[in-house]
Image: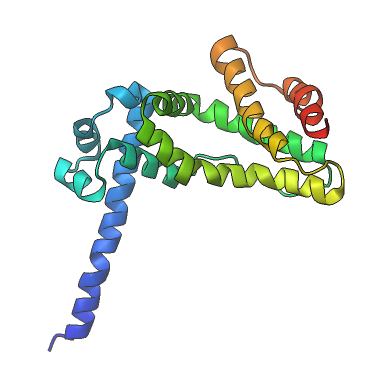
């Protein structure tokens, strides 16, 4: 005799696993297409074809392209993972810029595609600012919090605003606009001549 309770449990569990696998396929297709052709040229049709799912499957999950892209980036954890406390502000900043440099070198096309898309699509920009970017800011906020706790700098929200955008802007500009490598000597100059002066001003 079939155990009806066990059968029901198995059926209930199966869709969750299938849905997770399907979402991973869709997210992978979204990120690949963002890198290859950018946000504007990417369509729901293209994502469905690349992920080998129907358009109806995508629209059952997300109301439109901005929501789908933001969700893909959120699951990608498109952020800088700051290493553990080094004991000094300068050490933490060096660790952070090396992490940013690795991210830029590994996925600059994806980063640029997202930045350009946010400029032209208000809904995507809103979703990124509300659901994706705060996680990255929490990582870099920890550097300032540690420095404040050590007494190395004074708490200043305006300084935080400057700090969050400086390293990514400098590094992406060096790679994308100047076509120059990001080496240890350059990262030390960024820390010593830009980030530290801003934070300790």
When asked about the image quadrant of residue 52, the answer is top left
Colouring method of the image = rainbow
Q: Position of residue 124 (x, y in %)?
A: 38, 35
User: Is residue 186 something one can see in this rendering?
Assistant: yes
User: Is residue 83 something one can see in this rendering?
Assistant: no
Q: Position of residue 190 (x, y in %)?
A: 74, 24
Left or right of 179, for residue 33: left
Q: Position of residue 9 (x, y in %)?
A: 24, 77
Residue 125, above or below 77: above
Residue 72, above or below 177: below
- Using the image as rendered, state which of residue 146 and residue 38 is in the foreground: 146
When asked about the image quadrant of residue 128, the answer is top left
Residue reaching furthest to the top: 178
Q: Residue at x 76, y 24 (%)?
A: 194
Of the 4 image quadrants, the one containing the N terminus is: bottom left
When asked about the image quadrant of residue 47, the answer is top left
Q: Residue at x 23, y 81 (%)?
A: 6
Q: Residue at x 28, y 27 (%)?
A: 42
Q: Position of residue 144 (x, y in %)?
A: 74, 43
Q: How many marks?
A: 0
Residue reaching furthest to the right: 151
Left or right of 90, for residue 121: left
- Using the image as rendered, state which of residue 67 and residue 172 is in the foreground: 67
Residue reaching furthest to the left: 1
Of the 4 image quadrants, the one containing the C terminus is: top right
Q: Residue at x 27, y 56 (%)?
A: 19
């Amino acid at each position: 005799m079939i155990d009806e309770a066990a059968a029901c449990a198995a059926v209930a569990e199966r869709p969750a696993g299938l849905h997770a696998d399907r979402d991973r396929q869709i997210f992978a297709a979204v990120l690949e297409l963002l890198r290859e052709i950018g946000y504007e040229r990417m369509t729901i049709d293209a994502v469905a074809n690349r992920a080998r799912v129907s358009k109806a499957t995508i629209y059952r999950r997300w109301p439109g392209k901005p929501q789908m892209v933001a969700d893909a980036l959120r699951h990608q954890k498109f952020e800088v993972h700051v290493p553990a406390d080094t004991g000094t502000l300068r050490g933490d900043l060096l660790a952070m810029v090396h992490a940013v440099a690795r991210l830029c070198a590994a996925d600059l096309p994806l980063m640029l595609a997202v930045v350009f898309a946010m400029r032209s699509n208000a809904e995507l920009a809103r979703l990124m600012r509300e659901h994706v970017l705060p996680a990255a800011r929490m990582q870099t906020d920890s550097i300032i919090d540690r420095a404040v706790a050590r007494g190395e700098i004074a708490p200043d929200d305006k300084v935080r605003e400057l700090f969050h955008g400086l390293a990514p802007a400098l590094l992406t500009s060096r790679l994308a606009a100047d076509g120059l490598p990001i080496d240890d000597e350059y990262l030390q100059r960024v820390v010593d001549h830009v980030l530290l002066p801003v934070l300790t001003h």
